Image (spheres, rainbow, N blue to C red):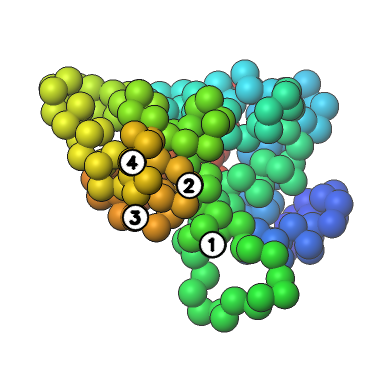
Amino acid sequence: MGSTNSTLSKIPNVEELMEETGFTPAHIVRLYDRFEALDKEKTGHLRPQDFGAINRLAMNPIGDRIIGAFFSPGQETVDFHSFVRILAHFRPADKKHPKDPSMPEPVNSRTSKLKFAFQLYDQDKDGKISRAELLQVLRSMLEMQVTEEQLESIADRTIQEADLDNDDAISFEEFRKVPLGRARRLTYQHGPLQHSAPRILSQPHRK
């Protein structure tokens, strides 16, 4: 307990961070230790290349996209608070407490999770998922399991199901409203993305 409190005392605004993300003190300490281990130059910030030390993430077929999600456009480093906020997207949504309309959307709400998943597809940041972008993700995840013809069939069927305005792409509103079936389940709910953040959180750093 003393060690936990000692670590928490090093983190500015830690109470607000726990309230915002839903992480427990034990989780925050574990994440802080992980962050410190990755921050080899002790700058208080991580660069994209620092994430290469996470073996599970480096081996993930969409690892580059997940790493990129930690960084806003033009941002070259991420601090501990931002690191924790991104990882909070992977927490199960808290359904026990009623939503307070006066409070900001929880980081791990269904809408926030979908926005996070959406940006992993939308690599050109134009607010839409094109057939080509969908195929890129599917190829990364399923290339060794299915044929190219099957991948294209999955992409075409997904676009057809979700594209309500017939522009041959999927906007966030369409992504949010329409069940995307296999493609979204494989990417976010049951695929590699689901397991990456928990690995970051729980695995000890190996020097």
Residue at 20% in and 39% down = 157
Q: Tell me how far mark 2 sits from mark 1, CA to CA.
A: 15 Å
Q: Mark 4, mark 3: which one is toward the viewer? A: 4
Indicate which label's residue lies in the foreground, 1 or 3: 3
Label 1 secondary element: loop
Q: Which residue is mark 2?
A: 172
Q: Say which quadrant the N terminus sits in.
A: bottom right
List the residue tagged with mark 3: 178
Residue 185 picture location, percent across and down = 30, 47
Expressed as whole percent of the image width and height from the top left, the position of residue 7 reads 78, 51
Q: Position of residue 82 (x, y in %)?
A: 71, 43
Name the residue beneath numbered marker 4.
Answer: 166
Give me the C-alpha separation between circle 1 and circle 3.
Answer: 17 Å
* Viewer-side residue, 63 vs 42: 63
Tally of numbered tags: 4
Residue 81, given in percent of the width and then of the height, sits at 74, 46
Alpha carbons under labels 2 and 4: distance apart: 14 Å
Would residue 47 be found to the left or right of residue 143 on screen? right
Residue type, label 2: Phe
